């Protein structure tokens, strides 16, 4: 059986414009970090040792799994039995939001530790990039959680049908973007040296 | 889809173990960047659902990922030459 490709990606097309803008913005920061590091490798390596890689690792597992739960939620919404679809999707989304919530808690603990150590934007170039990238990403996670909450509420009320899930798909794309950005951020800031 | 999720988890564990045991050298940086590309590509193709879309939309995020990771690799290679 020949499966034809969709002409446009899932979700509202506007979300893809946002995705492209976010990818360019974060891309500039990622590459900027890498080239800034090549100017002072010793400083970046020493500073990186002050990070606890376990925070980054836990957060990666949380976001990947949360993203997977969102995929399951979207798949659930496509079930023919409307009531069951809404209930299942709502549960998957609660799971995804819980994991996203753990990400936020984990990050706050990590940030609090850094503040206690007296680390701030002007500590050095490594920490400037670390704070800008992780705080910027953190804000995206917060926004993503608000979006997921709205989708979950609508799903719970049976507001999506198998033929009309574009709104949910749009929110899901944003959450996967947040995951994708962290997938690059984690090895770059925490691991590679 | 569960296979994609498990692959993503395994590649994350692999990266963490290398970093945690301080096993990183230039060759392993390259391995890690390739593994990051695979992870990102899986999210783009399967989670974002771009594998079912015509190539012109499908290629944009993957191309972004390839360019960003390649530039990072160049920066790390440049840094290794200066050591």
Image: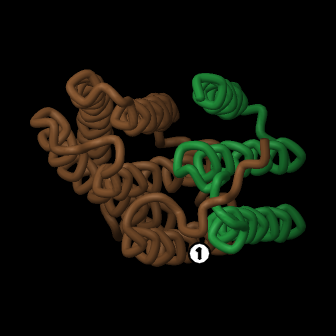
**Which quarter of the picture shows residue A85?**
top left
Left or right: B61 with respect to A151?
right
Q: Which residue is mark 1?
A: A32
What hue represents chain B?
Answer: green
Q: Looking at the picture, how far across and down is residue B31, in whole percent? A: 83, 43
Q: Residue at x 60, y 68 (%)?
A: A7
Image point 10% across, 36% down: which residue? Answer: A157
The reply to whether residue A119 is visible in this rendering is: no
Which sits in the foreground, A112 or A171? A171
Q: From the viewer's perspective, tell me whether residue B47 is left or right of residue A124.
A: right
Q: Is residue A151 visible?
A: yes
B48 vs B34, nearest the viewer: B48
Does residue B56 lie above or below A182 as drawn?
A: below
Q: How is the image coloured?
A: by chain
**Residue at horizontal 42%, vertical 67%?**
A128
- Frontmost residue, A13 versus A3: A3
Please say if A94 is above or below B71: above
Q: Position of residue A20 (x, y in %)?
A: 50, 74
Residue B54 x %, y %: 68, 66
In the picture provided, is A75 more to the left or to the right than B59? left
Q: Colour of chain A?
A: brown
């Amino acid at each position: 059986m020949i499966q034809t490709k969709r002409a446009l990606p899932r979700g509202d097309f506007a979300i893809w414009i946002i995705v492209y803008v976010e990818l360019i913005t974060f891309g500039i920061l990622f590459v900027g970090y890498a080239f800034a590091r090549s100017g002072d490798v010793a400083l970046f390596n020493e500073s990186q040792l002050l990070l606890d890689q376990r925070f980054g690792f836990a957060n990666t597992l949380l976001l990947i799994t949360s993203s997977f739960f969102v995929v399951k939620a979207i798949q659930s919404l496509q079930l023919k039995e409307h009531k069951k679809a809404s209930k299942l999707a709502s549960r998957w989304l609660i799971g995804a939001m819980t994991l996203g919530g753990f990400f936020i808690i984990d990050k706050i603990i990590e940030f609090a530790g850094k503040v206690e150590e007296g680390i701030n934007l002007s500590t050095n170039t490594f920490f400037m990039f670390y704070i800008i990238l992780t705080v910027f990403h953190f804000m995206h996670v917060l926004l993503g959680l608000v979006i997921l909450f709205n989708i979950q509420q609508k799903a719970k009320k049976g507001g999506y049908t198998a033929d009309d899930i574009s709104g949910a798909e749009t929110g899901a794309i944003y959450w996967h973007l947040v995951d994708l950005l962290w997938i690059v951020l984690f090895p770059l800031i925490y691991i590679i040296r | 889809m569960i296979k994609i999720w498990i692959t993503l988890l395994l590649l994350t564990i692999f990266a963490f173990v290398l970093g945690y045991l301080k096993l990183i050298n230039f060759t392993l940086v390259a391995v890690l960047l390739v593994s990051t590309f695979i992870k990102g590509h899986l999210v783009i193709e399967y989670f974002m659902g771009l594998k079912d879309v015509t190539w012109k939309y499908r290629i944009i995020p993957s191309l972004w990922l390839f360019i960003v990771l390649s530039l990072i690799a160049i920066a790390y290679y440049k840094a290794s030459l200066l050591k």
